[in-house]
Image (spheres, rainbow, N blue to C red):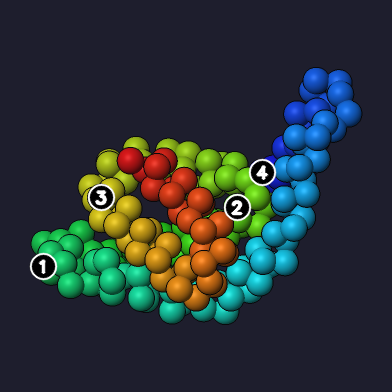
């Protein structure tokens, strides 16, 4: 996993250069949004169960997926879905704090689509739930932090699609 600082420094180091104005602007932007990201992470941590619950209710609960024969039918499947959504929320939050999506590739997306396909997990419904999670999260953390988190939720959705 990298963070925004490491990514900027590594790029300059590979080129054997000092940080240029563009690199410094990236770092400046990262530091300027630091408090916003930390507050958002605290809000998400304090409300994670509510975010997951409202996301499932908004996107999945009243659809065919929860009825007999659906992919969330039976308590075990429902619990696995909740568990996975919790992972996505947690790792999207880590990515937002780091200012870098690489943790999502390493810890979430690497092989996930193939695993879901082999298990028959409906990717469309998963993406729908992540999009709902993006909306629910934004309503709790506010517009600016919600837009920052959206980058990481969208990254997960893109990796699954």
Tell me the distance, in whole angstroms, between the alpha carbons under discs 2 and 3: 23 Å
C-alpha separation, residue under disc 4 versus residue under disc 2: 9 Å
Image quadrant where one finds the N terminus: top right
Q: CA distance from mark 1 to mark 3?
A: 19 Å
Q: Earlier in the sequence, mark 3 or mark 4?
A: 4
- In-image side of 113 versus 151 (left or right): left
Residue labelled with disc 4:
1
Residue to which mark 1 is pinned = 68
Q: Is residue 148 above or below residue 56?
A: above
Whether residue 90 is visible? no
> Horizontal placement of 115 versus 51: left or right?
left
Q: CA distance from mark 1 to mark 2?
A: 36 Å
The extreme right residue here reads 18
Q: CA distance from mark 1 to mark 4?
A: 40 Å
Q: Which mark is residue 26?
A: none
Question: In terms of secondary structure, where does tag 2 sit?
Answer: helix
Q: Which numbered mark, 1 or 2, is in the foreground of this view?
A: 2
Where does the image place residue 92, in percent across and percent down from the top left? 53, 56
Look at the numbered disc 4 and give the secondary structure of its residue: loop
In the displayed image of the protein, which residue is found farthest to the top? 15
Instruction: Give the residue drawn at x 53%, y 71%.
Output: 142
Question: How packed is label 3: few (under 14 Cα within 10 Å), some, or many (20 or more)?
Answer: few
For marks 2 and 3, the one nearer the N-term is 2
First-in-chain label (4 vs 2): 4
State which mark lies toward you, 4 or 2. Answer: 2
From the image, tell me which residue sits under label 2. 95
Q: Nearer the viewer, mark 1 or mark 3?
A: 3
């Amino acid at each position: 996993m990298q963070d925004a600082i490491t990514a900027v420094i590594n790029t300059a180091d590979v080129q054997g250069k000092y940080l240029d104005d563009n690199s410094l602007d990236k770092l400046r932007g990262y530091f300027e949004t630091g408090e916003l990201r930390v507050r958002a992470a605290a809000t998400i941590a304090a409300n994670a169960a509510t975010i997951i619950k409202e996301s499932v209710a908004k996107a999945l609960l009243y659809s065919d997926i929860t009825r007999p024969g659906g992919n969330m039918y039976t308590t075990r499947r429902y619990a696995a879905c909740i568990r996975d959504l919790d992972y996505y929320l947690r790792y999207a939050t880590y990515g937002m704090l780091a200012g870098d999506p690489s943790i999502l590739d390493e810890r979430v997306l690497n092989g996930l689509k193939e695993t879901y396909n082999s298990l028959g997990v409906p990717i469309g419904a998963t993406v729908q739930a992540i999009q709902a999670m993006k909306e629910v999260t934004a309503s709790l953390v506010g517009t600016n932090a919600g837009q920052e988190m959206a980058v990481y939720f969208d990254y997960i959705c893109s990796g699954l699609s």
